[in-house]
Image (cartoon, helix red, strand yellow):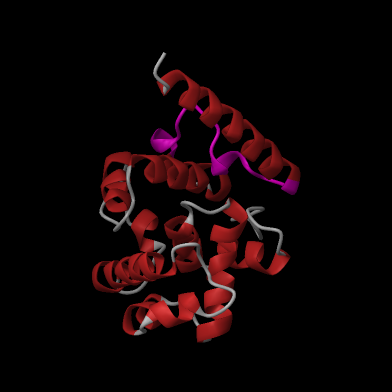
């Protein structure tokens, strides 16, 4: 288990997402339409504002005002507050509030994929990225078959690796957009 993940500019946020499975999950929920750094800093901001980010706290709190408090936790505070709430309810109700059971309780890759896909807001791309982090950073054997051929956050093991990953992602997105553009 790593002592930190290098997904933000904050050493404290990086340590939190590495040590708290619910924080890692919340970071993945927030990882859309904002930078990786903003998304994965969100769990620390939530913890500072709420005192805790366990599943029960997140599931039983009206998160929208917490997300909207300046500076906002996400570009879309209302919808992201709802998604974090929904994931927290799922973890509370299906895993007794223990987010790590999503992967530690999976017997194989198929079961792990099903567990992750059942999380509200987790589509194929998040399954691959989350699976890659679980396999490459946390050594979760059941996640190895979820790792895609392309670079993901699972490949990020330093601040420089994050910069390299984001640069490659920008190039890939530009090429993909160009290929989809009408001739």
Is 149 in the magenta? yes
Residue beneath the point at 41% across and 40% down: 128
Q: Quadrant of residue 174?
A: top right
Relative to 174, residue 7 above or below: below
Quarter of the view holding residue 72: bottom right
Please tell me which residue lies in front, 145 or 5: 5
Image: 47 above or below 161: below
Q: Which residues are magenta?
A: 144-159
Where residue 164 appears, as percent x and y from the top left, is 69, 36
x and y, in percent, of residue 131 in the image: 43, 44
Quadrant of the image for the N terminus?
Answer: bottom right
Quadrant into which the C terminus falls = top left
85 above or below 119?
Answer: below
Q: Is residue 96 left or right of residue 163?
A: left
Q: Residue at x 39, y 34 (%)?
A: 145
| Residue 142 visible in the snapshot | no
> Looking at this rendering, what residue extends furthest in the right direction?
160
Q: Is residue 46 visible?
A: yes
* Depth check, front residue: 72 or 165: 72
Question: Number of callouts in the render?
Answer: 0
Residue 68 % position (x, y) = 48, 76
Is residue 15 located in the magenta-colored stretch of the structure? no
Q: Residue at x 54, y 67 (%)?
A: 42
- Residue depicted at x 66% and y 57%: 8
Residue 78 location (% of width, % of height) = 38, 70
Q: Residue furthest top?
A: 183
């Amino acid at each position: 288990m790593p002592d930190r993940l290098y997904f933000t500019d904050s050493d404290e946020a990086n340590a939190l997402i590495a040590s708290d499975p619910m924080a890692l999950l919340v970071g993945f929920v927030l990882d859309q339409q904002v930078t990786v750094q903003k998304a994965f800093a969100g769990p620390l901001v939530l913890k500072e504002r709420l005192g805790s980010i366990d599943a029960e706290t997140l599931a039983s709190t009206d998160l929208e005002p917490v997300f909207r408090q300046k500076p906002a936790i996400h570009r879309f505070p209302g919808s992201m507050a709802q998604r974090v709430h929904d994931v927290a309810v799922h973890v509370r109700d299906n895993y007794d509030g223990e987010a790590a059971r999503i992967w530690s309780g999976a017997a194989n890759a198929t079961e792990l994929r099903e567990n992750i896909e059942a999380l509200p807001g987790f589509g194929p791309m998040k399954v691959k990225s989350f699976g890659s982090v679980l396999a490459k950073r946390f050594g979760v054997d059941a996640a190895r078959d979820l790792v895609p051929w392309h670079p993901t956050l699972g490949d990020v093991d330093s601040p420089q690796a994050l910069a390299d990953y984001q640069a490659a992602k920008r190039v890939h997105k530009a090429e993909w957009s160009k290929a989809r553009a009408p001739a």
